[in-house]
Amino acid sequence: MNTFQLSCFLAVAEYLNFAQAAQSLHVTHPAVSQQIQSLEKELNVKLFQRTTRSVKLTEEGKTFLNDARQIVAISERAKKRFDSAEPRDIETLALGFYNFPCMFLLADALEQLRTARPELHPRLQVIPFQHIYRLLEEGGLDAVVGLKETANLKIKAQFKEIVKVPLVCLCSCKHPLASRSEVCLEELRKEKLALFTPAKATIPSVKIYGVLIGDRPPSEFYFCESAEAITVLTSAGYGVSVLPGFLVPDTPQIVKIPLRDAAPESFGIYYKSLQGKPALKAFLQCAKGCFGPGADAASPMKLSGTREPFRRYP
């Protein structure tokens, strides 16, 4: 089936006359007849009742009429999309994230990028952790946005830090710690914990987990595959957690308490090269600019999405 066949069918359906249909299409009468016969053979139905005096649509032809109109309309629309007198290449920027909070964190940077490069088409994708860096290496992504990974991961890309992100203690609003303005790690050694599985934890988190776990029995830990799972367990009162504050949405059921003695995490962008990628270079500049020069955990800043300022880190 092709659009010329469908155009012949629609013309005959309109005029109910093969000669007039051929004239409207600027082709011969036999050409229209051949196209209709070919279409009927492909669909395995008769579309017209033809006699020496008249042409009528069959019930099957009436049913097919709307489908044919839609297919031809879609084809014409696709052609017009590229009929511009001044065709321009679309500039794209493919960014990968392994969770939605990381994506929301860069909303302000993307807004600045839109102003600087209005023709740019960002392509934002949330991709499972186990695949995201392979896509970056193979060229399927221009950059990956997230926390700095452990050196053991051996990512074949450069990392550009944007901001230092403080770790917080996460607990239920009903937990005794909920009223505290800050806590220290030693106090959390007495609590049951909901933590990332070791494979998902970042460098600062791994060190803190080692301090918190110590020689305690496995019954006092709940290992989770995602920040969402940690949030649910802490909200339900299974224990407390330690993780970057921006990974947790602001909800009445959850309290985020600054940790007095925990090093912040490095949040930034992985990329292979800036050579020949002006959009990526502009995005890096916008991202860095959103948090200010030399931004770190000691500077109060706003997080896109949550709009919650970072607390001062002692």
Image: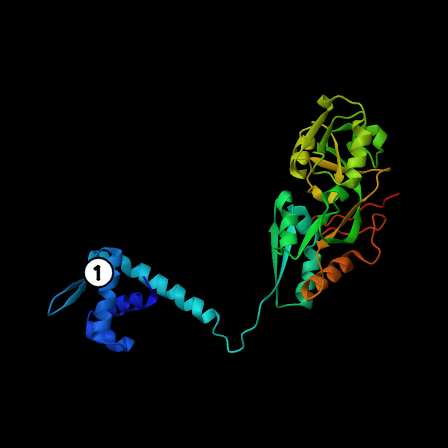
Q: Residues within 10 Å of mark 1 (few under 14, many from 20)?
A: many
- Give me the residue at 65% from left, 33% from top: 232
Q: Quadrant of the N terminus?
A: bottom left
Residue at the disc numbered 1:
47
Residue 108 image point, x, y percent: 70, 57
| As drawn, 118 above or below 24 | above
Residue occupying image coordinates x 23% and y 59%: 41
Amino acid, disc 1: Leu
- 60, above or below 132, in the image: below
Asked if residue 168 can be seen in this view, the reply is no
- Residue 311 screen position, x and y as percent: 82, 45
Coordinates of residue 198 in the picture (x, y in percent): 72, 34
Q: Is residue 303 left or right of residue 87?
A: right
The residue at 66%/38% (across/down) is 226
Along the viewing direction, whichever of 105 and 46 lies nearer the viewer: 46
Coloring applied to the structure: rainbow
Dot 1 falls on a residue whose secondary structure is loop
The residue at the point 20 percent across, 75 percent down is 19
Q: Can you say which quadrant of the picture contains the C terminus?
A: top right
Residue 72 is left or right of residue 166, and the answer is: left
Residue farthest left in this picture: 52
Q: Dividing the picture into quarters, in which one does residue 93 lie?
A: bottom right
- Farthest residue in the right direction? 314
Q: Is residue 288 left or right of residue 88?
A: right
Query: Is residue 12 at all visible to an observer of this figure?
Result: yes
Front in this rendered view, residue 127 or 13: 127
Q: Position of residue 177 (x, y in %)?
A: 79, 30
Q: In this orientation, which residue lies closer to the viewer: 219 or 215? A: 215
